[in-house]
Image: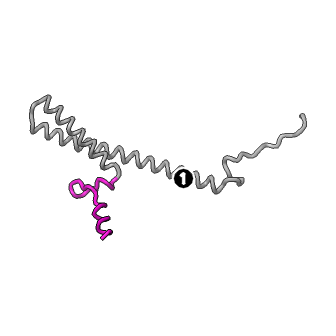
């Protein structure tokens, strides 16, 4: 019984039956930005023109553009962040492997200076 309850709790909100908004990175924020953008654009268009159907169409287009723009921007930032994290992790691994050896890039060889005046 507990397995069935856990499975029902894992079900997230699905947008149009295909996109699981809870588990897809950036999807929730993108949909919220899109909703706000569509509301703002549609309302401004309605206030400017008083045409209901055209304002709905403009609002829907605003939703699509805002959602896609926000999603792509977020995904690009996440990809850049993952690449930077991978680079840092590789650097830390190399630091651990080479620490204290002659191959350590932070260990600079000291030039032997003569002890007396020249």
Mark 1 is surrounded, within 10 Å at the Cα level, by few (under 14), some (14 to 19) or many (20 or more) other residues, namely few
Q: Residue at x 24, y 56 (%)?
A: 14
Residue drawn at (29%, 65%), measured in percent from left and top? 5
Depth check, front residue: 111 or 42: 42
User: Tell me, what colour scheme is on the image?
Assistant: one colour
Quadrant in which the C terminus is drawn = top right
Left or right of residue 58: residue 103 = right
x 28%, y 60%: residue: 11
Quadrant hosting residue 112:
top right
**Identity of the residue furthest to the top in this view:** 48
54 to 79, vertically: above or below: above
Locate residue 53: give its quadrant.
top left
Task: Give the x, y percent position of residue 71.
Answer: 32, 46
- Tell me where residue 48 appears, x and y as whole percent: 14, 28
Residue range highlighted in magenta: 1-24
Residue position for label 1: 89
């Amino acid at each position: 019984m507990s397995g069935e309850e856990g499975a029902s709790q894992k079900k997230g909100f699905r947008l149009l039956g295909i996109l699981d908004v809870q588990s897809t990175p950036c999807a929730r924020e993108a949909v919220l930005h899109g909703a706000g953008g569509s509301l703002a654009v549609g309302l401004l268009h309605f206030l400017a023109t008083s045409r209901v159907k055209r304002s709905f169409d403009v609002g829907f287009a605003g939703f699509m553009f805002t959602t896609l723009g926000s999603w792509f921007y977020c995904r690009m930032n996440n990809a850049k962040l993952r690449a930077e994290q991978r680079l840092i992790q590789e650097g830390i691994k190399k630091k651990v492997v080479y620490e204290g050896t002659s191959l350590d890039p932070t260990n600079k060889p000291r030039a032997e200076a003569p002890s007396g005046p020249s």
